[in-house]
Image (cartoon, helix red, strand yellow):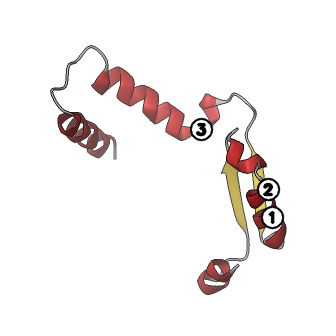
Amino acid sequence: MKYAKKRGLKRLILFLDNTSTRRSRQFKRFKLRNKEFLKVVALPEYSPNLNDVERINRMIQKDVASNRFWETVTELKKAIRSYLKVLG
């Protein structure tokens, strides 16, 4: 892979959740072409506790989005960005 060679990557571990992407023909070809440095680790079918994005989504939903009315999507985005900066 050109990107890996440019960056001098020796090994890359890619953790994937249960998306249809990882089962696609295109991804399987990509994985085969890059098998010398790419290791793909598939998370169990339902494992939100292992996926940080899911944890952050739950926090945003609980602390920012629930029981509130946002006049516009822009206001909601602003509130989410502020919340993430505090977490950051």
Q: Quadrant of residue 68?
A: top left
Q: Amino acid at mark 1?
A: Arg
- Left or right: 42 with respect to 72? right
- Callout 2: 10 Å neighbours few (<14), some, many (20+)? few
Q: Are marks 3 and 1 in contact (CB under 8 Å)?
A: no
- Label 1 crowd (10 A; few <14 / some 14-19 / many >=20): few
Q: Are marks 1 and 2 in contact (CB under 8 Å)?
A: yes
Q: Position of residue 58 (x, y in %)?
A: 45, 26
Q: Which mark is residue 3?
A: none
How far apart marks 2 and 3 lie (CA) works out to 24 Å
What residue type is disc 2 on? Answer: Arg
Real-space CA distance between mark 1 and mark 2, rounded to the nearest whole angstrom: 6 Å
* Disc on res. 51: 3
The answer to which of 66 and 59 lies nearer the viewer is 66
Q: Secondary structure at mark 2?
A: helix
| Residue identifier under label 1 | 29
Q: Which residue is mark 2?
A: 25
Relative placement, left or right, of 85 versus 1 is: left
